[in-house]
Image: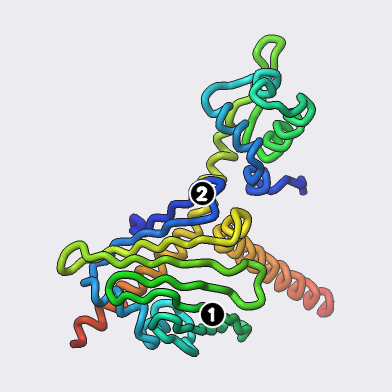
């Protein structure tokens, strides 16, 4: 089985979150991404590598340059991880509503 | 069916906001948080103690299908009937920290009301751990089911081998 990094650990880092926001606007080369940070080029490359391994970013070769852009698959996973939490509360509140409606009609 | 409950968890913040509108008069919605036997019904937990007053405390206990018991407790800091409850919440013997809950109850019409629950965690990572919990549990349940199926399969093949 392929060992994959934790998506949520990937987005827990503020630099990586900034990279996601930058790339969300337009596909960028690693050099263009690194220009937005004070950190070394290597540090930023490492962050990009982690985001790519987590399938949050994907590469696209355009001529001689490699561009990074958002990978819709990885982003979808992030958007949906909160769903089970929401569902848990929705189920609980639905139960509350049902219990109280019964309680109300008894009187 | 559309989910009526909204959860807002902003990136990098240590709080979440849960909002829900109920087809219930305000007084009935509030009662669901106060009466121990009603809390037991919708929360699916045993209420060991529930003192609905300022400086009161509460203790819940939930038993899972395997008979394992889980304790929850907290202290009530503010109690304004039909308006507001501020309380802490803690899962006993779990590394999820203590959270502060601010519950605001609001009347919309005679027959409808709104609950806004703001939960503040000790840190951003505590919040993210808590948010991920049902997600992780979901994965674990799926994983356990898979293990159960493979285990049965193994036993079945073992029995077949014995019969040979």
Please tell me which residue lies in front, B164 or A42: A42
From the top left corner, tell me how far across and down residue B20 is, in percent. Answer: 33, 61
Above or below for A54 versus A106: above
* Disc nearest the viewer among 2 and 1: 1
Residue B108 screen position, x and y as percent: 20, 62
Quadrant of residue A102 within the rendered picture: bottom left
Can residue B35 be spotted in the picture?
Answer: yes
Which residue position is annotated with label 1? B73
Q: Dot 1 lies on which element? A: strand
- Is residue A55 placed above or below B24 in the rendered structure? above
Report the front residue among B114 and B162: B114
Tell which subunit mark 2 falls on. Answer: A
Of the 4 image quadrants, the one containing the C terminus of chain B is: bottom right
Residue A15: name its quadrant.
top right
Do we see residue A60 in this rendering? no
Work out how far the residue at label 2 is from the one at label 1, CA to CA, in angstroms: 30 Å
Q: Secondary structure at mark 2?
A: helix
Against B7, residue A79 (above or below) is above
Residue A80 is labelled as 2
Q: What residue is drawn where x is 55% and y is 79%?
A: B72
Asked whether B68 or B10 is in front, the reply is B10
Across and down, in percent, residue B58 comes to: 48, 83
């Amino acid at each position: 089985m392929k060992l994959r990094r934790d998506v949520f650990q990937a987005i827990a880092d503020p630099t990586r979150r900034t990279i996601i926001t930058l790339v969300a606007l337009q596909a960028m080369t690693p050099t263009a991404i690194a220009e937005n940070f004070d950190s070394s080029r290597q540090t930023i490359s490492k962050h990009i590598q982690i985001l790519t391994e987590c399938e949050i970013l994907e590469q696209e070769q355009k001529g001689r340059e490699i561009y990074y852009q958002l990978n819709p698959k990885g982003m979808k996973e992030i958007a949906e991880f909160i769903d089970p939490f929401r569902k848990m509360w929705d189920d609980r509140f639905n139960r509350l509503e049902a219990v109280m409606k019964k309680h109300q009609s008894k009187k | 069916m559309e989910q009526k409950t909204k959860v807002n968890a902003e990136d990098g913040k240590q709080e979440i906001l849960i909002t829900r509108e109920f087809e219930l008069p305000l007084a009935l919605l509030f009662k669901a948080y106060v009466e121990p036997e009603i809390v037991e019904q919708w929360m699916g937990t045993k209420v060991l103690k529930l003192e609905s007053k300022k400086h009161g405390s509460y203790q819940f206990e939930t038993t899972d299908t395997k008979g394992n018991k889980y304790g929850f407790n907290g202290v009530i800091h503010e109690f304004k009937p039909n308006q507001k409850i501020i309380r802490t919440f803690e899962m006993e013997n779990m590394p999820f920290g203590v959270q502060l809950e601010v519950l605001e109850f609001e009347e919309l019409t005679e027959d409808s009301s709104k609950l806004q629950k703001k939960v503040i965690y000790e840190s951003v990572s505590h919040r993210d751990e808590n948010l991920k919990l049902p997600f992780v549990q979901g994965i674990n349940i799926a994983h356990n089911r898979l293990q159960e199926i493979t285990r049965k399969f193994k036993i079945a093949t073992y029995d077949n081998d014995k019969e040979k």
